[in-house]
Image: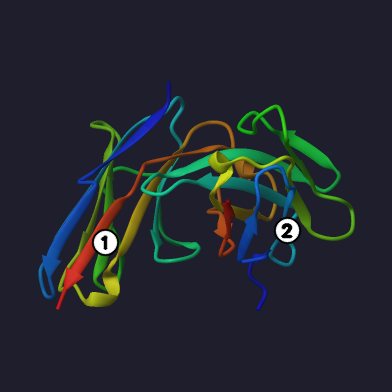
């Protein structure tokens, strides 16, 4: 399956722990986007990355949240010292290159559902 | 501020009915509007619309864009229980970001 792969599918963390969410883009895609979705709400943009570079992190909280997309391996969304309000579905999407140029649709992974207890 | 508004927020119909979902947008330097279907997992791409008045069709689903009135509709004819899902609309402006609506939750009763 050459689709966007996210893991884990479900993640349970206690308050104060760290959560690490992984995303492997589609084959040939070099750009990754992370979105958060709360119940009954749409997708909220968090961060846009290409390999070894954060393009835009304007949607990501300044504290406790970080993202990376190394030269080798998946993109990681890291949430430190999780709180109950971080409980949500986190979706990753990828595209082949700068969508502002090719205007192509995003392809999404199945998401990671984070529950903070 | 850019925004996308979908209506209705939820809709319950019987199998065989036809439904129309609405999406209005206000996006700076609008480029395209996209429809996705989301069941319990990944949003799956349905349509991308860039020009007014040109209907896109895929089986029982069709969509059209009105760039003058700033809205799009998604039609589903002869609905089936498998059409039950949340339908998401997103608009793209001049940058790479998509502005998402909250979705319409569609329930098809047998």
Q: Label 2: state its secondary structure.
A: strand
Closer-to-camera residue (B86/B56) = B86
x and y percentages locating residue B92 in the rendered image:
48, 38
Q: Is residue A90 above or below residue A8?
A: above
x and y percentages locating residue A36 in the rendered image:
55, 45
Residue A22 got which mark?
2
Closer-to-camera residue (A32/A39) = A39
**Taking A88 as reference, is B81 left or right?**
left
Q: Nearer the viewer, mark 1 or mark 2?
A: 2
Q: Chain of mark 1?
A: B
Q: Is residue B53 above or below residue B46?
A: above
**Taking B13 as reference, is B86 left or right?**
right
Quarter of the picture containing the N terminus of chain B is: top left
Residue B103 got which mark?
none
Q: Chain of mark 2?
A: A
Classify mark 1: residues with Cα within 10 Å, few (<14), some (14-19) or many (20+): some
x and y percentages locating residue B18 in the rendered image:
12, 65
Q: Label 1: state its secondary structure.
A: strand
Residue holding disc 1: B62
Quarter of the picture containing the C terminus of chain B is: bottom left
What's the distance in space between the residues labelled 1 and 2, CA to CA? 35 Å
């Amino acid at each position: 399956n050459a689709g966007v792969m996210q893991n884990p599918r479900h993640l349970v963390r206690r308050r104060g722990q760290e959560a690490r969410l992984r995303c492997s883009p589609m084959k040939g895609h070099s750009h990754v986007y992370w979105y958060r979705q709360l119940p009954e709400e749409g997708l909220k943009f968090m961060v846009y990355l290409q390999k070894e570079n954060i393009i835009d992190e304007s949607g990501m909280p300044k504290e406790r949240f970080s993202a990376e997309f190394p030269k080798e391996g998946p993109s990681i969304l890291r949430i430190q010292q999780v709180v109950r309000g971080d409980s949500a579905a986190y979706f990753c999407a990828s595209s082949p290159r700068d969508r502002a140029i090719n205007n192509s649709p995003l392809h999404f992974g199945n998401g990671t559902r984070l529950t903070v207890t | 501020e850019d925004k996308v508004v979908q209506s209705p927020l939820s809709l319950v119909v019987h199998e065989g009915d036809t439904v129309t979902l609405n999406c209005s947008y206000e996006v700076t330097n609008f480029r395209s509007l996209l429809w996705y279907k989301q069941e319990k997992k990944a949003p799956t791409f349905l349509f991308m619309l860039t020009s007014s008045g040109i209907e896109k069709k895929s089986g029982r689903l069709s969509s059209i864009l009105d760039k003058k009135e700033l809205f799009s509709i998604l039609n589903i004819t002869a609905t089936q229980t498998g059409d039950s899902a949340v339908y998401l609309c997103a608009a793209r402006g001049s940058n790479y970001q998509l502005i998402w609506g909250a979705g319409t939750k569609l329930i098809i009763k047998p």
